């Protein structure tokens, strides 16, 4: 870049929720999938949402024309968007791309969701968040080419409305580090090998953006903060240098802002500092400023804009604004040019606290959702330009709210704390696995027992009943009667299908965490607090604000009713402590481990009550165990210690005859395999269908020796697997895992599926199991 860089906006955010304040995008996208609106209507809805977002952000204090407003809209996922923008469409979807190389909206969604025998891109968690991205598939032959139309059109759309916004795209290094090798690639191939071929496409994009009038572009490089990446660190750092030296050397380009959310850049900071990029975003909530800097890095940084990510983009607490401003001031020692930002995209938090009319008024004063966080960023930006005195009032108000929270009733409950303090090592252990296996023989299960993960489709009828209960037009007795009818239907269906261990189907659960949050003390639930989980799917995390305890049994009536309907074992179904924490917004005023143990004790009491009611199989779901895994290796042992410990505390009181199951929603065990073994569950079900059973190889070598159910049906897609396909997956699993320990189940719960595909898929699973059993 030859001309001096334009000034970076003093206050900005890394990204904003894109699903809409009332989930408008979700509705529009799902209507398009259902065929009830056209592509043009969907485009229209999306354009309206983007326009409303820009106006909102400007009204909250971000600049209209100084590139402060990031363009972070996506129809489904930002990593998929990057893949499409660089032409990295997998071979099996090549036919979706027309002669001009363009992919229409229907084609875009097909890559995300699959069609016929063509599986969608794999999906996995985005860093340590509950957002899931689609994993690009890159091979030695992937032909990169630029398809920047959408990015350019959004920038132009903003410009036409009087804005100069900041286009945002996943950076080239992170894009390749998050990609997986395409099928058929040589075993020593890694997507990062293609960096030199990919960078020119980013270069072309930057040139096009400059032509369109973009002054700044944001390239997101969160992979640089993560140590859980399969590429040697040296290679990562070389890639940073290669990519950003090349992009920086372009004659015609916007100024480059590299954002690195979710932790410290550590040794990537000197690497990035040595390149010509104009601005670097530092996560100063999860991460910290380097304690020492080599002179060359210090000099380079002093010539760049440092974007201080001091407002937590990852949680909903109003937080300590004065401390945040202290951190901004500390960054001023490194560079004269400092801006204020969120630590991460606000994608992880709901839109607006002011939309919440049911939350306790006192609790509300302790909170900040996306819009409030934008306001905080603007306040801190004002402090930067006008001096600290100008924002003293706002800083003091935030501190007062924090002090109020600290002393509020329910935040610390003596009885809960005493019980926790009295725990001993014995509370975390069951008798040996072999003794349990012997005791559980009484369940009388066949080889390769079949089961499901818990939920059955949440039909419109179920949702309407719940809405009527909440709205008051259905009494709780009427609601219970309807749910019991549903449970009976689900039990009969499973008996007809010939499944071995049955479930009640979870119709009464609005959500696997919120259901418990509503029944436990110490939690609050929001009305509109939705956040995107993947694609059009959203979750509404509860707020864990105080000490947790269980005023009454939570699931016993439903489970014992379901068991009363059948001779087959009925699985009791609980959500584990780590998942309850991971999928809630959790208090930040004590160690997570303490909070997890409080939740565990409540679950322990529930398990005891389920046993008392005659339930012999109990599943404690921990799909989020891996998701909370710290990105820095040094932080992982302590995390695994408290997370595994809380699961063991929850289940440690179960008698040997009770078969404890757990369920995890992923298959890349890698670093967590020992932790999964340490959970000491009798049976663990995991996701495996989408990655075609690759996981059984890891299992084989890891020495895992308890029951395991690798999923044979990808429930994230409406596709029905054929009997042959399931059989092939099972045979592959049976080749690695002894039949005595192998379970047969789908990848995950069925709540998001429709009945037609569910019944057909389960029938295929039972049929395939019978065929495999016959061959044993
Ligand atoms: N038991 C839950 C269900 O089936 C598990 C869901 C999950 O793992 N995300 O819905
Ligand atoms: Zn799952």
Image (spheres, grey):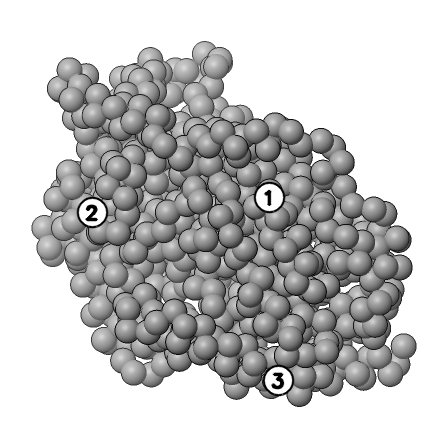
Q: Earlier in the sequence, mark 1 or mark 2?
A: 2
- Residue 383 in the image: state x and y as whole percent: 18, 22
Q: CA distance from mark 3 to mark 2?
A: 45 Å
Residue 757 drawn above or below residue 666: below
Q: Earlier in the sequence, mark 1 or mark 3?
A: 3
Q: Secondary structure at mark 3?
A: helix
Q: Residues within 10 Å of mark 1 (few under 14, many from 20)?
A: many
Residue underneath mark 1: 600
Q: Using the image as rendered, state which of residue 384 and residue 319 is in the foreground.
A: 319
Q: Earlier in the sequence, mark 3 or mark 2?
A: 2
Residue 211 visible in rendering: no
Q: Secondary structure at mark 2?
A: helix
Residue 45 visible in rendering: yes
Residue underneath mark 2: 354
- Identified at 29% across, 39% down, the residue is 363
Query: The C terminus is located in which quarter?
Result: bottom right
Residue underneath mark 3: 492
Q: Using the image as rendered, state which of residue 272 and residue 771 is in the foreground.
A: 771
Q: Using the image as rendered, state which of residue 737 and residue 46 is in the foreground.
A: 737
């Amino acid at each position: 870049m030859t001309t001096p860089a334009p000034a970076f906006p003093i206050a900005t955010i890394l990204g904003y929720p894109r699903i809409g304040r009332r989930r408008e995008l979700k509705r529009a996208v799902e209507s398009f999938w259902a065929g009830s609106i056209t592509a043009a209507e969907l485009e229209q809805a999306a354009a309206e949402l983007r326009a409303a977002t820009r106006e909102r952000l400007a009204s909250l204090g971000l600049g209209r024309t100084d590139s402060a407003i990031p363009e972070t809209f996506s129809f489904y996922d930002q990593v998929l968007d990057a893949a499409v923008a660089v032409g990295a469409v997998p071979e099996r979807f090549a036919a979706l791309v027309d002669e001009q190389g363009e992919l229409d909206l229907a084609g875009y969604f097909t890559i995300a969701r699959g069609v016929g025998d063509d599986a969608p891109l794999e999906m996995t968690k985005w860093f340590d968040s509950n957002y899931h991205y689609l994993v690009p598939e890159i091979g030695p032959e992937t032909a990169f080419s630029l398809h920047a139309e959408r990015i350019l059109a959004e920038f132009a759309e903003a410009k036409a409305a009087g804005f100069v916004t900041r286009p945002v795209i996943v950076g080239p290094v992170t894009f390749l580090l998050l990609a997986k090798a395409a099928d058929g690639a040589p075993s020593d191939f890694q997507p990062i090998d293609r960096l030199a071929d990919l960078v020119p496409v980013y270069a072309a994009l930057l040139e096009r953006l400059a032509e369109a009038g973009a002054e700044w572009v944001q390239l997101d490089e969160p992979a640089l903060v993560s140590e859980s990446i399969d590429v040697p660190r040296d290679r990562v750092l070389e890639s940073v240098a290669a990519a950003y030296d090349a992009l920086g050397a372009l004659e015609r380009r916007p100024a480059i802002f590299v954002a690195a959310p979710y932790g410290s850049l550590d040794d990537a900071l000197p690497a990035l500092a040595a390149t010509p990029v104009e601005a670097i975003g530092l996560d100063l909530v999860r991460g910290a400023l380097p304690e020492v800097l080599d002179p060359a890095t210090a000099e380079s940084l002093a010539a760049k804009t440092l974007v201080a990510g001091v407002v937590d983009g990852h949680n909903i607490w109003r937080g300590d604004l004065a401390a945040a401003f202290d951190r901004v001031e500390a960054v001023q020692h490194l560079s004269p040019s400092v801006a204020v930002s969120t630590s991460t995209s606000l994608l992880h938090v709901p839109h607006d606290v002011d939309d919440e009319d049911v939350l306790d008024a006192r609790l509300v004063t302790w909170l900040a959702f996306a819009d409030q966080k934008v306001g905080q960023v603007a306040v801190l930006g004002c402090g930067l330009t006008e001096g600290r005195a100008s924002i003293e009032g706002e800083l003091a108000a935030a501190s007062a709210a924090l002090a109020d929270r600290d002393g509020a009733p329910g935040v610390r409950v003596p009885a809960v704390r005493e019980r926790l303090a009295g725990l001993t090592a014995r509370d975390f252990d069951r008798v040996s696995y072999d003794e349990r296996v012997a005791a559980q023989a009484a369940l009388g299960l066949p080889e390769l027992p079949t089961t499901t993960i818990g939920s059955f489709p949440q039909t419109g009828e179920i949702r309407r009943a719940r809405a009527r209960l909440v709205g008051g037009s259905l009494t709780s007795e009427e609601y219970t009667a309807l749910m019991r009818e549903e449970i009976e239907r689900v039990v009969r269906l499973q008996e007809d299908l010939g499944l071995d261990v049955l479930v009640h189907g979870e119709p009464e659960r609005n959500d696997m965490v919120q259901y418990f949050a509503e029944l436990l003390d110490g939690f609050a639930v929001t009305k509109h607090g939705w956040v995107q989980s993947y694609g059009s799917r959203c979750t509404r995390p509860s707020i864990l604000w105080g000490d947790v305890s269980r005023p009454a049994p939570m699931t016993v009536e439903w489970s014992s009713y379901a068991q009363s309907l059948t001779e087959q074992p009925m699985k009791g179904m609980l959500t584990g402590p780590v998942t309850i924490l991971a999928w809630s917004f959790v208090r930040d005023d004590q160690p997570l481990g303490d909070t997890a143990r409080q939740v565990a004790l409540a679950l322990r009491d529930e398990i005891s009550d389920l046993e008392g009611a005659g339930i012999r199989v109990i599943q404690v779901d921990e799909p989020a165990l891996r998701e909370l895994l710290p990105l820095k290796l040094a932080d992982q042992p302590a995390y695994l210690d408290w997370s595994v410990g809380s699961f063991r505390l929850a289940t440690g009181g179960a008698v040997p005859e009770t078969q404890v199951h757990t369920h995890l929603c992923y298959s890349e065990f890698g670093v967590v395999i020992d932790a999964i073994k340490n959970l000491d569950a009798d049976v663990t079900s995991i996701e495996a269908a989408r990655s075609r059973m690759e996981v059984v190889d890891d299992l084989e070598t890891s020495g895992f020796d308890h029951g395991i159910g690798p999923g044979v049906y990808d429930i994230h897609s409406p596709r029905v697997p054929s009997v042959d396909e399931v059989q092939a997956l099972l045979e592959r699993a049976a080749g690695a895992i002894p039949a005595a320990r192998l379970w047969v189940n789908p990848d995950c719960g069925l709540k998001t599926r429709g009945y037609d595909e569910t019944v057909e898929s389960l029938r295929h699973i039972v049929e395939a199991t019978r065929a495999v059993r016959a061959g044993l």
